[in-house]
């Protein structure tokens, strides 16, 4: 496939996504083997295109206003195994291999560390590695 043909295919794929008014789409990362939901982040067109081209999760950091290649500082890269778009075209699901087994910046397996019980949110996931040792 020529570079121009590849670009047209990416443009077609990106055009099928229903971007929100900020030009973003929510992206859910799911462990490809175990099925655990690891995290949710945002993608803009460039992040999704980069994810498709590179075969690894690339997000849009709203706080930094820049692309964020998952694992660029921690080493906890998310290698893309499969990517899906939901029925409304407004949410991306990525099945990933989570390198190092840690997806959350808090040093946990995934970001969903709070469980609602007895009328309050309580931490239910252990820290696998101290964030000070990661970043």
Image (tube, grey):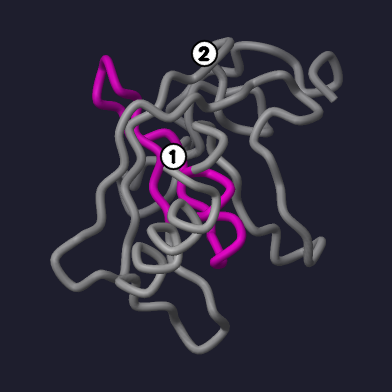
Outermost residue, left direction?
A: 87
* Alpha carbon distance from label 2 to label 1: 14 Å
Picture coordinates of residue 115, whole percent (x, y): 37, 41
Check disc 2 and report the residue beneath it. 101
Quarter-of-image position of residue 112:
top left
Outermost residue, front direction?
A: 2
Is 82 left or right of 78, judged from the image as shown?
left
Picture coordinates of residue 6, whole percent (x, y): 46, 51
85 in relation to 82, above or below: below
Q: Report the number of discs.
A: 2
Q: Give the residue at x 33% y 32%.
A: 95
Quick one: label 2, few (<14), some, or many (20+) residues within 10 Å?
some
Q: Give the residue at x 31% y 47%.
A: 93
Frontmost of labels 2 and 1 is 2
Check disc 1 and report the residue beneath it. 112
Looking at this view, is 51 or 61 the one in front?
Answer: 51
59 in relation to 75, above or below: below
Question: Could you tell me which quadrant the C terminus lies in?
Answer: top right
**Magenta-colored stretch includes residue 28:** yes
Question: Could you tell me which quadrant the N terminus lies in?
Answer: top left
Q: Give the residue at x 35% y 26%.
A: 81
First to last magenta residue range: 27-52
Instruction: Tell me the element at label 2.
Output: helix
Quarter-of-image position of residue 46:
bottom right
Query: Which mark identifies residue 71?
Result: none
Picture coordinates of residue 12, whole percent (x, y): 36, 68
Instruction: Tell me the element at label 1.
Output: loop
């Amino acid at each position: 496939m020529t570079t121009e043909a590849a670009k047209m295919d990416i443009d077609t794929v990106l055009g099928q996504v229903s971007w929100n008014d900020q030009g973003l789409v929510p992206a859910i990362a799911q462990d490809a083997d175990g099925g655990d939901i690891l995290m949710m982040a945002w993608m803009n067109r460039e992040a999704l295109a980069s994810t498709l081209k590179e075969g690894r999760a690339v997000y849009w950091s709203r706080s930094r206003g820049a692309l964020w290649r998952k694992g660029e500082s921690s080493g906890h890269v998310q290698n893309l195994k499969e990517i899906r778009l939901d029925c409304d075209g407004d949410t991306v699901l990525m099945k990933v291999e989570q390198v190092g087994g840690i997806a959350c910046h808090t040093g946990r397996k995934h970001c969903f560390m709070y469980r609602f019980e007895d009328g309050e949110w309580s931490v239910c996931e252990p820290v696998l590695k101290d964030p000070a040792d990661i970043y």
